[in-house]
Amino acid sequence: MKRIYLFIIVIALIGCKPSVREGLDFYDYEDFEFSVEEELSKHAFTDSINASHIEIALFKEGFLTVDYAGNLKKSVLKNALYLTDNSNFDFYGTNGLAYVWGAKDHTKKTRPVKYRKKSNKCKEELYGLDCSGFIYQIFLMSGFKFFSYGDENPSNFADSRFFSNPVKWKFPVNKYCEGIDCLKIERINEPTIGQIESGDLLFFYNSKKRTTHIGICLEYNGKLIFFDSGGNPNKDCSQAISKGPRRSILSENLLNAWKKRRHGILKITNAN
């Protein structure tokens, strides 16, 4: 009789063996192709586990090649389109989304920096962004948060000189990738228009090698588009309101329009 009970217990234990899909055991997936998004939609993982964390962990284990640059580029394009589409829209009130020098947050009204100077005629608070604020926001909205070695206040570091310096990207890249060098940032000065690709940050600098303006080139509807926020809010407010986030087809004429300035690009690609 004891042998019969023992046999029943063994059979029951075998029947209760957990499925390989339970939990987050990376080695269970070694011979199993899957999509992170698809598995999340099937509730294979608990809701408390973030998809990006799963991708990072799997990347470390070698079971998944994560296209960070590609995913980031898609998200940045979506947010660049959103901001340029909403420039001067009712969502931002009567002012529209303007060009505001020094503005890094388009959801709050701000005055242009140095608005107290007599030469600055526009002293109103406006919804808007400057060129580096535009870059800061489209990356921030895409889950990529810029820091300057512990400083999280964008007013202290988010400028065109910061974003055009590949060394400055080291710290935020490591934070974005949880310590993995997943992105390669390369600066190229004076590229030909044929070298400029979707995802490249395009910046302009003067004879003193100081970066004065920045935007991003992204493919949209089969064309390479330059997204930026341009204007001058200090002459009068009406000009500021008519400017702001915009997009233009990248061309030789666009590059030549920046007289007395040289241009360069920052290429963002997967490290491996």
Image: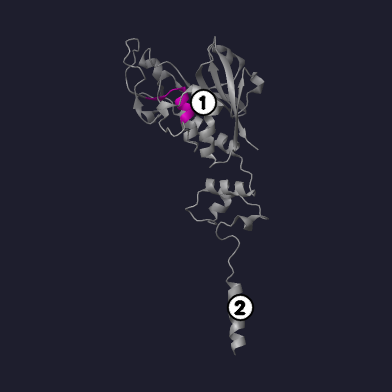
Reading the image, the residue beneath label 1 is: 163
Q: Is residue 90 magenta?
A: no
Q: Quarter of the image holding residue 93?
A: top left
Residue 99: x %, y % from top left: 42, 21
Q: Residue at x 53, y 12 (%)?
A: 208
**Is any atom of residue 33 visible in this view?**
yes
Q: Amino acid at mark 2?
A: Val
Q: Is residue 252 left or right of residue 97?
A: right
Residue 11: x %, y % from top left: 61, 77
Reading the image, the residue beneath label 2 is: 10
Q: Amino acid at mark 1?
A: Phe
The N terminus lies in quadrant:
bottom right
| Nearest to the observer: residue 250 or residue 113 | 113
Residue, far front: 149
Q: Is residue 11 left or right of residue 130?
A: right
- Magenta residue span: 127-136
| Nearest to the observer: residue 225 or residue 233 | 233
Residue 272: x %, y % from top left: 65, 38
Q: Residues within 10 Å of mark 1 (few under 14, many from 20)?
A: many
Q: Is residue 252 left or right of residue 131?
A: right
